[in-house]
C-alpha cells in the first residue's frame, strides 16, 4: 500500500476521485496501477510473474469475477481494490496518489461492504502498509515464513468491528 517517499505531484486530493466497480475495459489500467504500485512500494520483493502475465491475470481472472473496484480521477484509474467476501485481497494506488486519502476511502468501502470483519495479507517488509492498516483498526494475526510465490514472508491482518 505504501512505499518510499511520494514524488512531488500536483494531483488533487481524494475528493475529486470516484470509487466505482471496475468494468472489463478497466483491466489494463488496473494491472498498470498494480505494477507501478508494487514496483514502487516493494523494490526488494521479487515479483513472481512478468508484466504480461500480470496483465493477463487482471484481464482474464480478477476483473471478470467481480469484487474489483477502481479509483478514478479525471478519467484515469489511480487506484484499485479487490474485495472477495471478507478478504481484502488487493489494494494498490498509483504512487502519485499515496497519502491523499484514496486508500482510506477504499478501506472504508471495504468495511461498509463487509461489516462483519475483514482480513488481508501484506509482506512483512512492507512496514508502511502495516502502519496504514493498523491505523484503520487492523491487527496482525499471523506471520508466515515466505511459503508463497514471491518467497517473501508475509503477515495476515484482521479487522473486527
Image (cartoon, grey):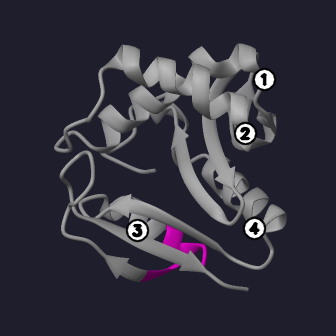
| Residue tagged 2 | 69
CA neighbours of label 4 inside 10 A, class few (<14), some (14 to 19), many (20+):
some
Cα–Cα span, label 1 and label 4:
22 Å
Q: Nearer the viewer, residue 100 or 56?
A: 56
| Residue tagged 4 | 111
Cα–Cα span, label 2 and label 4:
14 Å
| Residue tagged 3 | 130
**Start-end of magenta stretch:** 133-140
Residue 134 in sight from this viewpoint: no
- Asked if residue 121 lies left or right of residue 151, the reply is right
Mark 2 vs mark 3: give the one in front.
Answer: 2
CA neighbours of label 2 inside 10 A, class few (<14), some (14 to 19), many (20+):
many
Label disc, if present, on residue 23 of the rendered structure: 1
Cα–Cα span, label 1 and label 2:
9 Å
Cα–Cα span, label 2 and label 3:
21 Å
Q: Residue at x 50, y 26 (%)?
A: 57
Disc nearer the start of the sequence (1/4): 1
Cα–Cα span, label 4 and label 3:
17 Å
Label disc, if present, on residue 151 of the rendered structure: none
Amino acid at each position: 500500500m505504501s512505499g518510499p517517499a511520494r514524488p512531488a505531484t500536483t494531483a488533487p486530493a481524494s475528493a475529486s476521485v470516484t470509487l466505482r466497480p471496475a468494468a472489463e475495459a478497466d483491466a489494463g489500467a488496473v494491472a498498470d496501477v498494480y505494477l507501478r504500485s508494487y514496483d514502487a512500494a516493494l523494490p526488494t520483493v521479487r515479483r513472481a510473474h512478468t508484466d504480461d502475465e500480470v496483465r493477463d491475470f487482471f484481464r482474464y481472472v480478477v476483473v471478470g469475477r467481480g469484487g474489483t473496484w477502481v479509483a478514478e480521477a479525471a478519467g484515469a484509474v489511480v487506484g484499485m481494490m479487490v474485495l472477495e467476501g471478507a478478504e481484502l485481497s488487493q489494494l494498490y494506488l498509483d504512487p502519485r496518489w499515496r497519502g491523499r486519502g484514496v486508500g482510506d476511502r477504499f478501506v472504508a468501502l471495504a468495511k461498509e461492504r463487509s461489516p462483519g470483519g475483514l482480513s488481508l495479507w501484506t509482506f512483512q517488509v512492507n512496514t508502511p502498509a502495516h502502519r496504514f492498516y493498523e491505523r484503520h483498526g487492523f491487527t496482525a494475526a499471523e506471520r508466515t515464513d515466505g511459503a508463497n510465490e514471491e518467497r517473501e514472508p508475509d503477515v495476515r491482518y484482521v479487522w473486527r468491528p
